[in-house]
Image (cartoon, rainbow, N blue to C red):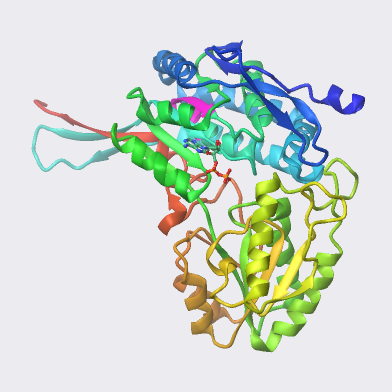
Amino acid sequence: LDKQSQKLEFKREAAYFDGQWIAADSGRTTPVTNPATGELLGTVPDCGQAETARAIAAADAAFPAWRARTAKERAKILHRLADIVEANSEALGVLLTVEQGKSLAEAKGEVMFSAAYVRWFAEEAQRVYGDVIPSPWPGRRILVTKEPVGVVGAITPWNFPSSMIARKLGPALAAGCTIVIKPAAQTPYSGLAWGALCEMAGIPAGVVNVLTGSASAIGGELTSNPAVRKITFTGSTPIGKLLVEQSAKTLKKVSMELGGNAPFIVFDDADVDRAIEGAMIAKYRNSGQTCVCTNRFLVQSGIHDRFVEKLVAASNALKVGNGLDAGVQQGPLIDEKAVAKVEEHLADAISKGAKVVAGGKRHKLGGTFFEPTVMTGVTPDMIVARDETFGPLSPVFRFETEEEAVRMANDTEFGLASYFYTRDLARAFRVSEALKYGMVGVNEGLITTEVAPFGGVKESGMGKEGSKYGIEDYLDSKYVCMGGL
Ligand code: ADP
């Protein structure tokens, strides 16, 4: 523990706004625990409406000077921030693992991914082009410019406590916006670390502010304060809908990255080993706790038994344990509620005839550890067909025809990520066009990258993060008609 606490050099037990590290007005704090051990890591301030209003005022005051900097200057600072994140990936990774639970390898990977987002947007900052449109009138010119929207409110989840902030903070700062961030209560330290990192990078006071505390009080102020011009949220669909509703009163721009119900379709003509490799990463990454994790395996009859047999073997081979221990691939689930949900989905499926063929119960390590689990004979009337499990549960549905698979895959209100495996080129095009999803992996189980647009359709949200499209959400276009020429 001693060695570990030395490494928690980015742990900050204060909120960061206007360049200051502060306690809550009330002096109250909230504890933060390690999900792998249950040990207390420390506390964070329990901020509310008043502190949020002050953070917004700081961001509003910092906005004119930050937007007035040239794109090149902002890019330089963002590159410096990316360098600092990369240089501290070990310490930031350990901090992430102890509060979130994922393996250290995955945690360091996430930190590097954060740096990649910041760097990408450092470059995009310099590619925010306007337009000159041929005028229908003589003596006038039509100009279109892009301007930063203003103060951004960002609310982020616990499953990617570092990178979900990076892909909001990166484009916001690149565009010339300032930002107030509320990280999730379970994983506040990776969020507060951004305050320390931004300080080290020389980002001026008020440009980036990070507040911990009451979700409803902070969220309520962010969505109702007229100075905030945009809300960007990653989290559950019900909370996303609530935030959109709250933001409607002051008509803020909104970007929502919400829940998914990802299908993973394996056709008879698939390369089964490649499909298993993709399945393992699409399903068990972060112990199944990502919004793009496979929620449903749809497997064609002819390949079904072979696929299941290999999936069972691979699931049983996963090493479960404390994310800091060498070779661990599966950490604990985030909390007791998360375990209860997996158990509920499992019990419901079993009661309706599904069969457990791997795992199926809490792990002998105790706490919130759960065995990687596979079940077959899953049917559309079971809860797992509709609800996101967010845990290490692999339900396998059997299908006969391509039409049936596409119908099953689309039979959900969600539309985030989807995956399918086939070696038939015509089918690859047909199915990727038929899937009502924002993202499709064809013969790939891991498709997220900072260069491609991440985002969903239907009730999985609106807006894109990453890529050349990701900065658009932080910009307004302005039309200027130059007359009297
Ligand atoms: P999850 O189920 O993954 O925790 P949530 O949508 O509940 O997803 O949480 C995602 C983020 O939204 C977290 O930072 C959480 O604190 C925040 N949040 C939860 N409820 C509210 C709310 N009423 N207003 C604003 N933010 C909220």
- Decide whether residue 173 is among the magenta residues: yes
- For residue 62, above or below residue 458: above
Is residue 284 toward the left or the right of residue 408 in the image? right
Question: Residue 282: which quarter of the image?
Answer: bottom right
Q: Where is residue 172 in the image (x, y as percent from the top left)?
A: 47, 31
Which one is in front, 184 or 181? 184
Which one is in front, 119 or 363? 363
- For residue 429, above or below residue 157: below
- Residue furthest front in the image: 351
Magenta-colored span = 171-181
Q: Position of residue 451 (x, y in %)?
A: 56, 47
Which one is in front, 401 or 242? 242
Q: Position of residue 218 (x, y in %)?
A: 48, 27
Q: Quadrant of the C terminus?
A: top left
Which one is in front, 394 or 123? 394
Q: Position of residue 237 (x, y in %)?
A: 47, 50
Which residue corresponds to the image point at 76% horizontal and 82% vertical from the top-left?
306
- Decide whether residue 354 is among the magenta residues: no
The answer to whether one can see residue 199 in this image is: yes
Is residue 241 toward the left or the right of residue 76 in the image? left
Q: In which quarter of the image is the N terminus?
A: top right
Which residue corresponds to the image point at 11% horizontal and 28% vertical from the top-left?
483
The answer to whether one can see residue 120 in this image is: no
Which residue corresponds to the image point at 63% horizontal and 40% vertical from the top-left?
158
Question: Residue 40: which quarter of the image?
Answer: top right
